[in-house]
């Protein structure tokens, strides 16, 4: 009677373990990553069998080799790699992978008596990886029941792992696509030579800056700047030297403006438009003067020559605390251009500024 009772208890325990394995997927919150799934797997695994070391090897998409991903405990990483290398050398590893069935084998890298269990992780189409278990349990104490339960767990784990790997791969492709699209967007709105924004970006974003300043009653200023005698640089030193001057000019300006708010666009050949949100005309004029002095001190080396450049600046803007019904980008730029013309007419290498006004 006692024997029947023991068999009944063992059967109930077996059924309970099978039900727990069937709920493996329910214990994982999706989308999950491989580490999270691995932790759940370890918990279920240790409920089935006493293991000292457990390691996960996954097939690398690029090399198609089995790469060690996780080990528990972590300090056993090197010996787990050594164990797999031994199993590969003697041909057991490939035999197990090809059979696609768990196998109980002697552990080769461990000095003490230990058994190794390998659980191939497979889908209908491919092998995802292998789980290596090291246990001190003698071979004859690991029952067929244990192996069948481990097989069930491996199949559950393989299914979840395949979906997770696919999800991560698709996510990576999506991120790569977003990055590529972002780079394309950046290229489409930046000047290929100098790296600052181009005329297309200017035409698109200056109206937004004006609209926002008017809506929230903020100041907005712009500075139209032009490299003095730039044609002479091209004629004397060549267009490659002229390209270098343009790059250095932009770098000089970008190093002095607010990177999180101000922005610079190439308006024409050697003309650039600096947009200064929440900046009064007086402060914009002082900023332009700083830029002018900084440029005047700069020396650009070209082969055996040293080239000095200067620039002229036309500054304008508006204070939206005063009522404006509408300001067009064209009218704002036209005002800055008038002040730039004054700076050039008075001898260049200077700043001329004034509040926004509509010129006839």
Image (cartoon, grey):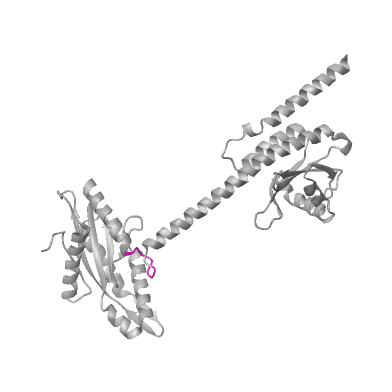
Magenta-drawn stretch contains 302 = no
Q: Is residue 78 above or below residue 333?
A: above
> At 39% across and 68% down in the image, what residue appears?
192
Residue 289 point in image, percent of width and height: 24, 67
Which image quadrant is residue 207 in? bottom left
| Residue 59: image location, x then y, percent | 69, 51
Task: Using the rendered image of the protein, determine whether residue 49 is visible from the camera's viewpoint.
Answer: no
- Picture quarter with the N terminus: top right
The answer to which image quadrant residue 230 occupies is bottom left
Return the x and y of residue 307 as percentages of the image width and height: 34, 80
> 135 left or right of 186?
right
From the image, give the main secondary structure of the stretch colored magenta. Answer: loop
Instruction: From this view, report whether residue 353 is shown above or below residue 120.
Output: below
- Write the start and end of the magenta stretch as one range: 192-198
Q: Where does the C terminus fall, quadrant-wise?
A: bottom left
Q: Quadrant of residue 113?
A: top right
């Amino acid at each position: 009677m006692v024997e029947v009772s023991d068999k009944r208890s063992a059967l109930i325990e077996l059924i309970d373990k099978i039900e727990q394995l069937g709920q493996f997927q329910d214990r994982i919150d999706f989308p999950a990553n491989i580490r999270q799934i691995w932790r759940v797997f370890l918990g279920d695994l240790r409920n089935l069998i006493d293991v000292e070391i457990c390691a996960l090897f996954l097939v690398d998409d690029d090399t198609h080799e089995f790469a060690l991903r996780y080990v528990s405990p972590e300090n056993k990483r090197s010996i787990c790699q050594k164990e797999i290398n031994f199993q590969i050398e003697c041909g057991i590893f490939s035999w197990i992978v090809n059979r696609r069935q768990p196998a109980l084998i002697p552990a080769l890298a461990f000095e003490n008596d230990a058994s190794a269990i390998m659980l191939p992780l497979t889908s209908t189409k491919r092998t995802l990886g292998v789980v290596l278990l090291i246990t001190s349990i003698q071979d004859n104490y690991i029952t067929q029941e244990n192996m069948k339960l481990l097989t069930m767990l491996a199949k559950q784990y393989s299914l979840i792992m395949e979906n997770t790997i696919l999800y991560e791969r698709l996510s990576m492709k999506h991120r790569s696509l977003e990055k590529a699209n972002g780079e394309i967007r950046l290229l489409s709105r930046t000047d290929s030579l100098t790296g600052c924004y181009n005329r297309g970006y200017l035409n698109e974003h200056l109206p937004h800056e004006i609209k926002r300043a008017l809506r929230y009653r903020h100041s907005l200023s712009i500075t139209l700047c032009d490299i003095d005698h730039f044609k002479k640089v091209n004629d004397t030193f060549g267009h490659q030297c002229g390209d270098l001057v343009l790059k250095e000019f932009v770098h000089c300006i970008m190093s002095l403006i607010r990177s999180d708010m101000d922005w610079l666009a190439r308006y024409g050949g050697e003309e650039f438009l600096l947009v200064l949100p929440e900046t009064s005309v007086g402060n914009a004029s002082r900023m332009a003067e700083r830029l002018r002095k900084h440029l005047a001190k700069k020396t650009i080396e070209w082969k055996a020559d040293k080239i000095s450049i200067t620039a002229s600046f036309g500054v304008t803007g508006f204070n939206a605390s005063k009522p404006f019904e509408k300001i067009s980008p064209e009218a704002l730029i036209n005002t800055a251009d008038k002040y730039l013309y004054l700076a050039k007419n008075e001898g260049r290498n200077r700043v001329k500024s004034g509040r926004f006004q509509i010129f006839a």
